[in-house]
Image (cartoon, grey):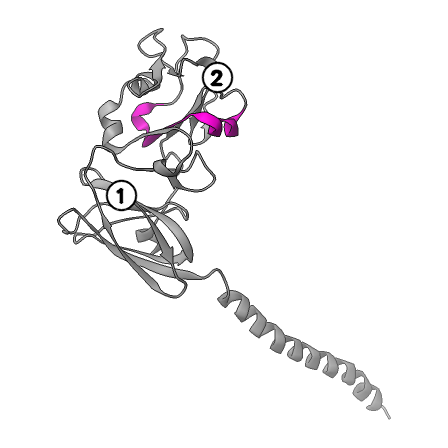
């Protein structure tokens, strides 16, 4: 008689353990499925070649949409792994080899191959992200956009931002002093031209008086974007003259494919 209570009390415990086992048998496949599921991805491989078809080493290639960057090998080969499926913008540029902008479509579970041909010309197309929600080249933008970068920026660099951009069409600079020089776009200056650094306001007082310089150092810039037209309304109603965005990569915007493996 003394063992019956023990047997009766063990039945709920046994049923609870069985319930846990059954529940775990359902949850484990679901968790494994959740880990295996995810956005479809594919790989991208190719070569960077010049006009003669020879491989070009040391060319920086960027997948602008997913913020990935890599460098071509000695034979011009490059690769990106685990790239989300869909259409992407591939930008290539070398110090002296020219540049190119290509659109590639990645298929899930497959390896896409492409040859990027660099063209050495006076006009080098570049990708502008600040002027639109997605990455587009200058030829695809509806508004007037000026982009200085690479060798072109190195040749035109000056001690101040205004002097650096003063030789661009429609842009001049204030001339209060050697260091205090602010861009003037289409005759509009002061607070009617918004100054940005990596997409954020510079926070200086150059708009209040012409004797104050812009706090952005042009020598550290990787590229300078000048926006005109309706796109400037994205940066405030006071930017009716234009927007100058200096990109200096103070905070890295791209992940290295070599580090990702």
Quadrant in which the C terminus appears: bottom left
Q: Nearer the viewer, residue 241 or 197?
A: 241
The relative height of residue 224 versus residue 161 in the rendered view (above or below) is below
Which residue was labeled with disc 1? 100
- Give the extent of the magenta segment: 217-236
Tell me what residue is drawn at x 62 percent, y 76 percent. Answer: 26
Foreground of the two, 207 or 251: 207
Residue receiving disc 2:
192
Asked whether 229 falls inside the magenta stretch, the response is: yes
Q: Residues within 10 Å of mark 2 (few under 14, many from 20)?
A: some
- Please tell me which residue lies in front, 82 or 112: 112
Helix, strand or loop at disc 1? strand
Q: Position of residue 58 (x, y in %)?
A: 20, 46
x and y percentages locating residue 214 in the rendered image:
40, 17
Please tell me whether residue 7 is drawn above or below residue 210 in the rendered image: below
Viewer can see residue 93: no
Q: Residue at x 35, y 60 (%)?
A: 43
Q: Earlier in the sequence, mark 2 or mark 1?
A: 1
Q: Indicate whether 90 appears above or below 34.
A: above
């Amino acid at each position: 008689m003394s063992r019956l209570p023990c047997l009766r009390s063990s039945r709920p415990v046994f049923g609870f353990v069985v319930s846990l086992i059954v529940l775990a048998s359902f949850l484990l496949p679901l968790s494994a499925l959740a880990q295996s599921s995810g956005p479809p991805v594919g790989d991208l491989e190719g070569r960077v070649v010049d006009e003669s078809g020879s491989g070009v080493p040391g060319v920086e290639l960027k997948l602008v949409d997913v913020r990935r960057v890599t460098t071509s090998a000695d034979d011009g080969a490059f690769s990106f792994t685990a790239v989300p499926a869909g259409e992407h913008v591939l930008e290539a540029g070398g110090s002296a080899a020219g540049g190119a902008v290509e659109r590639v479509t990645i298929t899930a579970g497959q390896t896409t191959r492409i040859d990027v041909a660099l063209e050495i010309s006076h006009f080098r197309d570049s990708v502008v992200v600040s002027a639109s929600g997605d990455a587009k080249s200058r030829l695809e933008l509806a508004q007037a956009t000026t982009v200085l970068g690479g060798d072109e920026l190195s040749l035109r660099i000056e001690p101040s931002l205004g002097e650096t951009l003063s030789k661009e069409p429609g842009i001049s600079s204030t001339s209060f002093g050697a260091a205090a020089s602010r861009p003037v776009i289409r005759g509009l200056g002061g607070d009617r031209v918004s100054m940005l650094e990596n997409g954020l306001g510079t926070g200086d007082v150059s708009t209040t008086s012409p004797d104050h310089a812009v706090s952005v150092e042009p020598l550290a810039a990787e590229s300078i974007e000048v926006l005109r037209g309706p796109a400037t309304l994205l940066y405030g109603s006071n930017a009716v003259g234009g927007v100058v965005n200096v990109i200096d990569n103070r905070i890295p915007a791209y992940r290295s494919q070599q580090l990702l493996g």
